[in-house]
Image: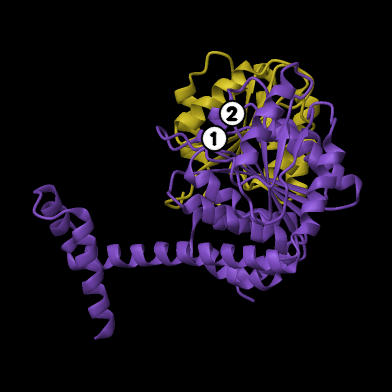
Amino acid sequence: MKSGRKIRVLIAKPGLDSHDRGAKVVARALRDAGMEVIYTGLRQTPEQIVETALQEDVDVIGLSILSGAHKALFPRIMDLLKKQKLTDIMVFAGGIIPEEDFSEMKKLGVKEIFGPGTTTETIIQYVLKNVHDRT
Amino acid sequence: MTKNEELAKGVLSGDRRNIAKAITLAEDNTPEAQDLISLIYPHTGKAYIVGLTGPGGAGKSTLAEKIVREYRRKGKTVGVVAVDPTSPFSGGAFLGDRIRMQELSTDQGVFIRSMATRNYAGGIARATKDAVKILDASGKDLVLVETVGAGQSEVEIIKVAQTIVVIHAPGLGDEIQAIKAGIMEIADIFVVNKADRENANKTVMDIQSILQLNNKESGWKVPVLKTVALTGEGVPELVDKLEEHRRFLDKKLEHERSRERAETELVEAIKEKVVAAIVEDLRKEGKWDEFLQKILRKEIDPASAAERLLKKARTDAKT
């Protein structure tokens, strides 16, 4: 990252589940690590998430999902990011995603998936290490 | 075309990606940012700029969303700059204003940007002003700036607006809190939100009684309106008042205000540049530490040191 440039992160909750405790914990941890975290609340459509990422010019998107609908929602999100030419944004995910789906999600372009029990420190270090130097 | 010229062209055509990138440049305060602003500056001045401020919990974001909808209903395009504080401990920020504006995010006639104050004195005011200029140049009819109204820098931010709305709500503390916050004087329109609460009328009266003590010579009587942002009650009336104030800002008065704004901006810009230049020169000459040590040893006080440095800089400039 260029010096002086703050890492901007969008923490988003796609779909219909209504628990955002985990998302808020991660948002708070990233803030405490010095990042600017945009949190948009529950029940976001893929369109809303991608448009927000575009307007806020974020470096990273963290998707939190507990509903099991990741196989329906993530492809749509990744596809919209491509359409908007936002592929330089690093996308990670967390929540309840079965391990057998990991490779499918990663093939879509989701860079990493953090399951229950992941420490916030792991996520912070991962973001710091993998965020792109964007233009 | 240079990269900046392309970016400026994109901004002027209203391209959302270019607008987003331009605001990032302004936020990061890069030399490119200044060049970019100089390119778009001639195209600014068309948008109506409204500032929305008040204590946390008054309902700013929710009201902002309703105001935006009302303007959208009238077919106007809108830009929103939502400013939240940077944590003084970590340098990070939690920007949550969009939670109240979810449904606006896919409306192509609306552009919302969250900004953190980033703790540089005066700097955020400049970055916000630049963001407003970018949205203005991009062709938005209305630009809404929303910020927590506490402290000098927040007041500086909001001064970018042509019309300033100060929002309050019952149960957030008595009128003394409002006076302390220093935001009473800057209001063109007062809003008591959450007006469905039973003590709303008392809050309205409290504010009215303080306003009577303010002598504004402008001829504009500051109204105190009631809204319930959650349901949208009172919002059309608020928008009518906004438009009334906009008309009231006739050429003469608006000219005065523009002049005031231009003056403040120029002074801030000079400060920023001069300070940076002097500090850089001192560092280059290795004198920075020397002066600091002197101050630490109490051989000279900071103000006298600054004066001496200024004198030196002036003589250097002449030779």
Q: Nearer the viewer, residue B95 or B299?
A: B299
Q: Residue at x 64, y 70 (%)?
A: B41
Q: How many residues crowd around disc 1 within 10 Å: few (fewer than 14), some, or many (20 or more)?
A: few
Number of marks drawn: 2
Residue under mark 2: which chain is it in? B
Q: Which of the chains is purple? A: B
Q: How many residues crowd around disc 2 within 10 Å: few (fewer than 14), some, or many (20 or more)?
A: some
Q: Establish whether labels 2 and 1 are both on one chain.
A: yes
Element class at badge 2: helix
Occupied quadrant, residue B274 = bottom left
Q: Residue at x 77, y 56 (%)?
A: B246
Q: Which of the chains is yellow? A: A
Q: Is residue B168 visible?
A: yes
The percent position of residue B217, horizontal first and vertical second, equals 64, 55
Disc 1 marks which residue? Answer: B179
Q: Quadrant of the N terminus of chain B?
A: bottom right
Q: Nearer the viewer, residue B89 or B253?
A: B253
Residue under mark 1: which chain is it in? B
- Residues at circles 2 and 1 in contact by the CB criterion of under 8 Å: yes
Rendered view: B257 above or below B88: below
Q: Nearer the viewer, residue A53 or B197?
A: B197
Amino acid at pointer 2: Glu
The percent position of residue B95, horizontal first and vertical second, equals 60, 35
The percent position of residue A89, horizontal first and vertical second, equals 62, 44
Rendered view: A117 above or below A111: above
Q: Quadrant of the C terminus of chain B?
A: bottom left
Q: Residue at x 78, y 50 (%)?
A: B78
